[in-house]
Image: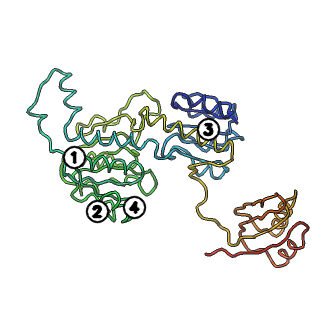
Amino acid sequence: MRVLVADKLAKGVTERLESLGCAVTVDAALQDDALAAALAEVQPEVLVVRSTKVSAAHLGASASLALVIRAGAGTNTIAVDAASARGVYVANCPGKNAVAVAELTIGHLVNLDRRIADQVAALRAGRWDKKEFGKARGLHGRTLAVLGVGEIGAQVIARAQAMGMQVRAWSRSLTDAQAAALGVTRCATPLDACRGADALTVHLAFTPETDRLVGRSLLEALRPGAYVVNTSRGEVMDQDALTEAIRTRGLRAGLDVFAVEPQAAAAPFDDAIGQNPGVYGTHHIGASTDQAEEAVGDEVVRIVGSFLRKGEVPNCVNLATASAATHVLVVRHADVVGVLAGVLGVLREEGVNVQGMENIIFSGARAACARIEVSRAPSGPVLDRLRATEHIFAVSLVPLEA
């Protein structure tokens, strides 16, 4: 199996993939046209990326491409819809960098309160100002609003609670039972979570629903002088609204992500928000710890190994969650060559589409049972024709619940 790695992964990942029997090509600098050219030349079955964007054109550059692995949590840098249309699996490595991102989040919160970065800058400039920098509110007992309670959000909650913070949380999937287990107050809306909170931290995937979700209404709901941290996706934050809230309400912000970021690892950054004295920025490095990179590397190897050995893709994000099937055709048959091909041929003649299928072999390998999910019920004559087919023992049709 050919694997193209188009980003930097943890040390040893390439060797481990090769030990599985993969032919691995590595070029961490690949992107845009160079990535398309490499895909066309190498014709990999598997493409592994981290921050590199994968477009529809990239997906079409390799006829062999069957799996794209994002060596991280999100998949917003990958044209998932285009991959689904081509039958290309897309998988990610959820939760493997959760601790690293949570640690940076807490670091931003502490810095926003104690202005550590400003103090370092002052000392390096030869200035001592204990009176100015001795002003801090403290985080113990303060209310933290957490938007998004996935793996990262849960890790942040645990660390914030360890510092004595009270946590309100909102997430589309958060239940009362889960909130109780986490020891947080579950809020019905993001606005409810933000009302009167001393700090806000965001851990949401970027979707059309979360595009600039943290805007004027949420920021105005926070207490004056509140702290805002975003280590998720830059597009989730309305940077103009944040800039205004910093100016008019004294908010401070710790941002690891921005609406527009350079593609290169080292490049100019001329977004005005980076010069705002109320913003403490880091360089989209939330997941960049040795521990996180090793955990992600382990997961990449596991996914490739499963796909190589069993044709199964752990953490696949683009399989259908709902089937168009209306019935299950159950066929008990002899385990001989051609039986299932004949069944599928009959279904094709009647225009019945197969939505899913499994074939279970009984001990001794003399008989099997096929469960075929179909788009509509085959007609009576078709069922009778199947029942009369050599090597088919029985045929039944089971309607699926709507």
Instruction: State the residue at coordinates (71%, 66%).
Output: 373
Q: Quadrant of residue 54?
A: top right
**Quick one: SS at disc 2?**
helix
**Quick one: SS at disc 4?**
loop
Using the numbered discs, state the Cα–Cα distance from disc 3 to disc 4 in whole angstroms.
33 Å
Q: Are marks 2 and 1 in contact (CB under 8 Å)?
A: no
First in sequence: mark 2 or mark 1?
2
**Quick one: SS at disc 1?**
loop
The location of residue 10, given as percent across then percent down, is 51, 31
Q: Amino acid at mark 3?
A: Leu
Q: Is residue 124 visible?
A: yes
The location of residue 58, given as percent across then percent down, is 62, 40
Q: Which residue is mark 2?
A: 192
Q: Nearer the viewer, mark 2 or mark 4?
A: 4
Using the numbered discs, state the Cα–Cα distance from disc 3 to disc 2 in whole angstroms.
42 Å
Q: Nearer the viewer, mark 1 or mark 3?
A: 3
**Quick one: SS at disc 3?**
strand
Task: Give left or right: position of 332 versus 277.
Answer: right
Q: Which residue is mark 1?
A: 251
Q: Amino acid at mark 1?
A: Leu
- Which of the numbered marks, if any, corresponds to residue 195? none
Q: Nearer the viewer, mark 3 or mark 4?
A: 4
Task: Give left or right: position of 40 versus 111.
Answer: right
Q: Which residue is mark 3?
A: 47
Instruction: State the residue at coordinates (24%, 54%).
Output: 166
Q: Amino acid at mark 2?
A: Asp
Using the numbered discs, state the Cα–Cα distance from disc 1 to disc 3 in whole angstroms.
42 Å
Q: Is residue 395 above or below residue 362?
A: below
